[in-house]
Amino acid sequence: MPVKKPSILAQTPARPSAHPWQYAALAALSLFTVAAFGTAPDTVLDTVQTRIVERVLPLPAIKDDEAATTYWREERVQRGDTLGSLLARAGVNDAEAMQYLRTDPAARPLYQLRPGRPVQVAVDDDGDLVALRFLTNTGERLVIERQDNGFRSARSVPAEEIRTVLRSGEIDSSLFGAADAAGIPDRVIGALADIFAGEIDFYHDVQRGDRFSVVYEMRYVDGEVAGSGRILAAEFVNRGTPHRAFYWRDADGTGNYYTDIGRNARSAFLRSPMELTRITSGFTMARFHPLLQDWREHKGVDYAAPQGTPVRATADGVVAFAGWQNGYGNVIFVKHQNSYSTVYGHLSTFAAEVKAGSRVSQGDTIGFVGMTGWATGPHLHYEFRVADQPRDPMSAAVPNASPLTAERLPEFRAAITPLVDSLSLARSLPSSALASTE
């Protein structure tokens, strides 16, 4: 008995195979049908009317002068560049220009440009320098142009474009290391530390896992970074506790930082008279003096820093004395409100405007680190006094700055709403290096 092959009930029964002549007939019919469609009678095609239009266009005016053959090119200063190699890449072959740039004091800022800075150069067909322009390290635009009788230089202050930047970081080894990883300029991270210096001891309290976010301004000129501006908002989460601050301009035009409830974020005194540095000697009643070779009180804190490092006033006040005094060497005494005073010793020099009777504001540079007086190496000796009695500046209670008045709170809260949202965005993202601009 023959075995039946299994089948699917819904399957269409197979049809008998067609003969080759049937396929040929079908193909011929198909061709005929297409041909019949293409040549069907009474088919009318639209006729497109065309016409030729001739119009004479005026050519742009081309001046037959030096400007017609001037070409601008941008080159960036490379590490190890000489003036000759920089201009050679820009196509300059001009002995007269090279002589001017090497000898004229007006061209000296060109030699001080840091690697990566752009220089725009205009040359003619012969390789002669027509003009050269660049931004100096101080932010000025310097233009050097060829004149009939030689070269002329001119300085100007270029228009700046302000962009707002939001960045966030997480500390793995150090605050500055995290800032570098997040692309935050040192100046900005130093300012952030200043803002929270009254609440966070950045020498001892900061630990791995602490996070920070900052909204700040960056200045641009001709599309190039010209420097960082002020911080508009900042948050630092230290040991799980968040600290926030927002920039707000007071009625008298003075800008300050406040918390989201209007409390002044800054203390009346900074904890440190310098940006983050290393303490070599703390406040103590018994320290072996390295120069005098005996035990005595150390009524201040010593900060190690290279010669010439800027020293800043820790609070608003009036300079009581600026000059030479005994073991302090070059020293500045500043009197503040409510019987507070500070001392800054072993300075190399004073800031130009600092003298007895001059007013200083918190954060102003008043002098520079040195090793004058009884000092064995460059460092700053800093004292904090209450009623002329020394106190440990690292632990002494300091007064808070004035908060916002109740009348100004609604306006302040409305103004900082976008900044609050920016910091919330930074907190919600897992990345430790958020970068969002404009």
Image (cartoon, rainbow, N blue to C red):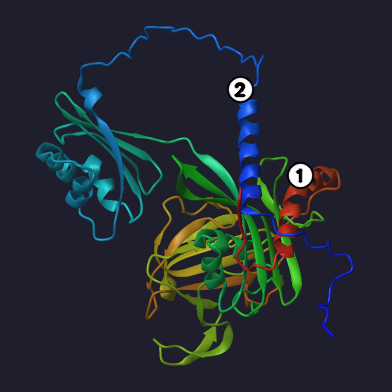
Whether the residues at callouts 2 and 1 have beta carbons within 8 Å, the answer is no
Q: Position of residue 218 (x, y in %)?
A: 54, 49
Residue pictured at 56% horizontal, 42% vertical? 162
Which one is in front, 93 or 342? Answer: 93
Q: Which residue has dot 1 on it?
A: 415
- Gap in angstroms between the C-alphas marked 2 and 1: 76 Å
Compared with 176, 221 (above or below) is above
Side of 397 relative to 328 (left or right): right
Q: Mark 2 points at which residue?
A: 39
Instruction: Left or right? Give the position of 260 relative to 101.
Output: right
Q: Residue at x 27, y 47 (%)?
A: 110
Task: Look at 51% across and 59% down and name the residue there.
Answer: 187
The N terminus sits in image quarter: bottom right
146 vs 407, left or right, is left
Q: What amino acid type is highlighted by mark number 1?
A: Ala
Q: Is mark 1 on a helix, strand or loop?
A: helix
Residue occupying the far left of the picture:
95
For the residue carrying disc 2, how many other residues have a C-alpha within 10 Å: few (<14), some (14-19), or many (20+)? few
State which tag comes first along the sequence, 2 or 1: 2
Relative image position of residue 342 (x, y in whole percent): 57, 66
Note whether residue 388 is visible: no
Where is residue 343? Give x, y as percent. Answer: 53, 68
Residue 426 lies, in percent from the top left, at 70, 61
